[in-house]
Image (spheres, rainbow, N blue to C red):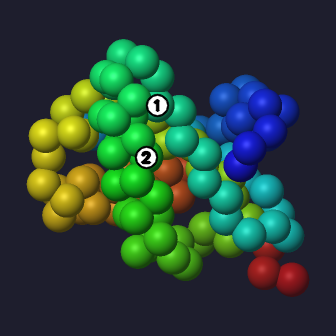
Amino acid sequence: MRRREDFQQVFDQGIRVSSRYFTLLVAPKPGAPARLGIVASRKLGDAVHRNRAKRLIREIFRLNQPLPGGVGIDLIVIPRRELLDAQFTALHEDFRTAWRRAAARLPVRNAG
């Protein structure tokens, strides 16, 4: 996701799930591929730290494709400072747990 309108729609209508290392905001978008947006504010640190956090999140998102029940969703990840000191496996597991919690709260779509 790149456009401000896309981010704003997820912030306004999305489901928020917090975990130890980040906050996920998820909004259904039927008929579209899963899209990722990352909000890394200056509270996270300087540009080096923000870019590292974004690289880690993009890799976790890539490794989890396709997300279970994730076709047609917009996902925003807001990293926490603790993410920078965590092991990758801990981040990956934390993301999967948070994603399962968020997916359980998404509205159920009809199969036909």
CB under 8 Å between discs 1 and 2: yes
Q: Is label 1 in a helix, a strand or a loop?
A: loop
Q: Is residue 111 above or below residue 39?
A: below
Q: Position of residue 36 (x, y in %)?
A: 60, 54
Q: CA distance from mark 1 to mark 2?
A: 7 Å
Q: Position of residue 85 (x, y in %)?
A: 13, 40
Counting residues from the N terminus, which is met first, the one under dot 1 or under dot 2?
Answer: 1
Q: Nearer the viewer, residue 37 or 93?
A: 37
The reply to whether residue 43 is visible in this rendering is yes
Mark 2 — residue?
A: 54
Amino acid type, callout 2: Lys
Residue that mark 1 sits on: 40
Left or right: where does residue 54 sit relative to residue 93? Answer: right
Label of residue 96 in the image: none
**Position of residue 83 measured from the top left corner of the image (x, y, whole percent):** 24, 40
What SS does tag 2 mark? helix
Q: Is residue 110 above or below residue 43?
A: below
The residue type indicated by label 1 comes to: Ala
